[in-house]
Image (tube, rainbow, N blue to C red):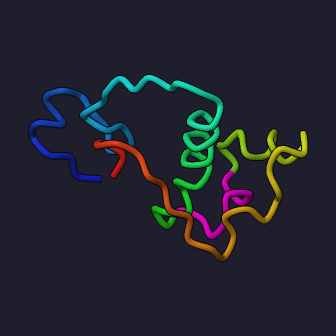
Amino acid sequence: MTLSASRQKKKEKRIWQRRFWEHLIRNQNELNRHIEYIHYNPVKHGLTKKPVDWMYTSFHRYVDKGICDINRGAGEKLEFEFTAGYE
């Protein structure tokens, strides 16, 4: 993998984003949307076809507890409405 000179100097790898921001989660609904966004992210970026196929996720725990349906996010495009910084 070839890294830019800037990333080499800062010893950054591609998996981590450079920018980050603080975001206050105000209620359970917002928390649920953020968790779903995280679960769906590997699908959105083409790393897997469905959230359940991604092994590095809390999605499996949510399925085991009956919180998420095992087929959630499979074969459907989920849309998320957040403020700036999530795209």
Q: Closest to the observer: 81 or 9? A: 81
* Residue 48 within the magenta-colored segment of the rendering: yes
Q: Closest to the observer: 62 or 53? A: 62
Q: Quadrant of residue 6?
A: top left
Horizontal side of 63 relative to 87 (left or right) equals right
**Furthest residue to the left?**
5
Q: Closest to the observer: 52 or 6? A: 52
Range of residues picked out in magenta: 47-54
Q: Quadrant of residue 21?
A: top left
**Majority secondary structure of magenta residues:** loop
Horizontal side of 10 relative to 35 (left or right) equals left
> Which residue is at a point 62% across and 47% down the rendered structure image?
36
Q: Closest to the observer: 46 or 5? A: 46
The percent position of residue 75, horizontal first and vertical second, equals 66, 76
The answer to whether 70 is drawn above or below residue 22 in the figure is below
The percent position of residue 82, horizontal first and vertical second, equals 41, 46
Horizontal side of 60 relative to 25 (left or right) equals right
